[in-house]
């Protein structure tokens, strides 16, 4: 029986990635206008609106009904569904998928990635690799539950402004941070966003980001890894890659760069860079 991976748009993936992949979009709302992430609103359009808007947009989880529809379509095609969602501690999307799966007697596997953005992305890419290798759905689900504990995501924010707008930090902290050119480094730890450190200025922030990668135990280059940026300009991440080529140079000739989608982009704002990988140890 063939296998289909179903995931949400917070993974920042495209269905072009694999014939075994289905993407369900989260909802993004600017004021009274609602969009489907990646369907009726592209990443570029999202950041154009984010920069222009005085009000922070909101995102909504995928409904159980949408998951039911996707699972039913998968089963009707003679495929076994494996659903991989963004962290259950950041969204109700995982619970929606679990509720939908309970409506079926057939095997439906639901995996909480305990991550988001490029962290979720590389777990899905690993799942797709296992599908191509001919692993059974049960073996893939078991492998994902183990592998997700080794996923590391670290990100450098250009500004605290969007965290302030979203109520994640106080107004005073946001203003002072901007005045002092504070660049926060954040990560996903046990499924939630945590502040890993702060640096003054871009150079120190880049160094701090590299230190976090080293602290994680190094990159397992035999597994998927991903880099991404937020906003309309990729200059910052290209500078980061140039400054830290010692990490990548002996392992790959080219690093692909993705765009952070609306789920994390809403709170990170433009000018952020994110790196995700499987820990080497």
Image (cartoon, rainbow, N blue to C red):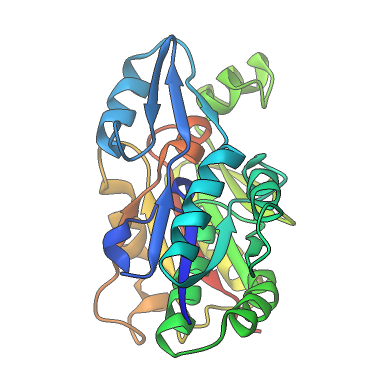
Classify residue 95 by image quadrant. top right
* Drawn side of residue 180 relative to residue 47, left or right: right
| Residue displayed at 71% across by 56% down | 189
* Drawn side of residue 89 relative to residue 176, left or right: right
Image x and y of residue 280, in percent: 59, 83
* Drawn side of residue 14 relative to residue 97, left or right: left
Image x and y of residue 127, in percent: 50, 74
Q: How many marks?
A: 0
Front-lying residue, 275 or 206? 275
- Residue 78, compared with residue 69, is above or below; it is below
| Residue displayed at 44% across by 71% down | 125
Image x and y of residue 49, in percent: 32, 21
Classify residue 224 by image quadrant. bottom left
Quadrant where the C terminus lies?
Answer: bottom right
| Residue displayed at 37% across by 41% down | 230
Q: Is residue 196 visible?
A: no
Image x and y of residue 166, in percent: 59, 22
Q: Is residue 8 visible?
A: yes
Classify residue 136 by image quadrant. bottom right
Front-lying residue, 92 or 242? 92
| Residue displayed at 62% across by 43% down | 93
- Residue 105, compared with residue 156, is above or below; it is below
* Drawn side of residue 13 relative to residue 95, left or right: left
Front-lying residue, 251 or 265? 265
């Amino acid at each position: 029986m063939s296998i289909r991976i179903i995931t949400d748009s917070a993974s920042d993936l495209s269905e072009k990635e694999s014939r075994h992949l289905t993407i369900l979009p989260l909802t993004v709302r600017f004021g009274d206008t609602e969009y489907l992430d990646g369907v009726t609103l592209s990443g570029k359009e999202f950041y154009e609106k984010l920069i222009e808007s005085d009000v922070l947009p909101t995102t909504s989880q995928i409904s159980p009904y949408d998951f039911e529809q996707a699972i039913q379509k998968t089963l009707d095609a003679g495929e076994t569904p494996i659903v991989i969602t963004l962290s259950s501690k950041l969204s109700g999307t995982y619970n929606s998928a679990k509720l939908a799966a309970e409506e079926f007697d057939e095997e439906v596997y639901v995996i909480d990635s305990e991550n988001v953005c490029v962290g979720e992305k590389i777990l899905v890419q690993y799942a797709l690799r296992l599908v191509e290798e001919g692993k059974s759905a049960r073996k893939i689900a078991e492998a994902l539950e183990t592998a997700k504990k080794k996923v590391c995501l670290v990100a450098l924010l250009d500004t605290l402004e969007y965290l302030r707008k979203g109520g994640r930090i106080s107004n005073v902290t946001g203003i002072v941070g901007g005045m002092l050119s504070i660049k926060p480094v954040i990560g996903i730890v046990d499924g939630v966003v945590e502040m890993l450190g702060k640096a003054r200025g871009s150079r120190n922030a880049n160094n701090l980001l590299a230190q976090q990668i080293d602290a994680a135990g190094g990159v397992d280059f035999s597994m998927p890894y991903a880099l991404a940026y937020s906003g309309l300009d990729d200059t910052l991440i290209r500078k980061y890659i140039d400054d830290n080529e010692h990490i990548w140079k002996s392992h790959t000739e080219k690093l692909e760069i993705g765009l952070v989608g609306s789920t994390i982009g809403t709170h990170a704002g433009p000018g952020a860079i994110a790196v995700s990988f499987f820990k080497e140890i």
